[in-house]
Amino acid sequence: MIAALTLALAFAVAQVSPVTVQKITSPQKALRLEVVVPGSLDDVWQAISTEAGMETWLWKDARVDLRPGGDWLVLYTPTATGGGTIVSFVPRKELVMKAMAPEKFPTVRSERTDVTFSLTAVSPTATRVTLMQTGWKDGAEWDAAYEYLSRGNAQLLTQLHQRFATGPLEWSKFQ
């Protein structure tokens, strides 16, 4: 089920992605992704900062405890989770977290990277979302996770864009 969904969404990302991806190598290694979402600042903030909002675009089972130290999690299966721990937030502007890499990158997952979602109103009905991921270290596993997450985070932001362009995802279609 998850593999089919991932494949379908990866295909959609490869076809026409509204997301720009920038791989930054200096002065500090980082991933910078950006998308203009066809939704108001308030609606996009609700989509990334609440369980109900995340479940309309990211996955059908999400956990959000919007406070420093709180969870921002997606529970794909009992043993496959994504997301991280909230470090700070400014409503309608920024959400900062210590992010977990997928399970196949155990060192990166345990040491975590820093992810900042920044939101800026472009118009009353459009919001720029910038995802900046920093804290990368040297090594083969870190390099592989960097490459993987350059695509995975593009998929994530594409899903957010699609949620506002075409409506909430209907997870029952993917079961």
Image: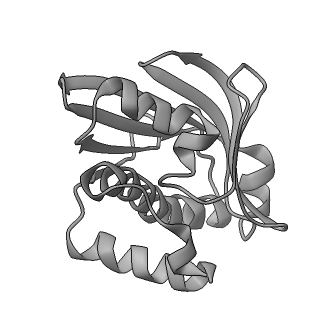
Q: Quadrant of residue 124?
A: top left
Q: Nearer the viewer, residue 84 or 122?
A: 122
- Residue at the (53%, 55%) spot, across then down: 58
Q: Residue furthest left?
A: 123
Q: Position of residue 69 (x, y in %)?
A: 78, 24
- Which quadrant of the figure contains the C terminus? bottom right
Colour convention of the picture: one colour
Taking the image as shown, residue 125 lies to the left or right of residue 145, namely: left
Q: Nearer the viewer, residue 24 or 91?
A: 91
Q: Position of residue 164 (x, y in %)?
A: 31, 48
- Residue at the (57%, 27%) spot, across then down: 96
Taking the image as shown, residue 36 lies to the left or right of residue 63, namely: left
Q: Position of residue 63 (x, y in %)?
A: 72, 43
- Residue at the (42%, 81%) spot, across then down: 8
Q: Quadrant of residue 80?
A: bottom right
Taking the image as shown, residue 165 lies to the left or right of residue 101, namely: left
Taking the image as shown, residue 15 lies to the left or right of residue 3, namely: left
Q: Residue furthest right?
A: 78
- Which quadrant of the figure contains the N terminus? bottom right
Q: Across the whole image, how many numbered discs are drawn on residues?
A: 0
110 up-or-down from 141: above or below: above
Q: Position of residue 101 (x, y in %)?
A: 67, 56
Q: Nearer the viewer, residue 51 or 90?
A: 51
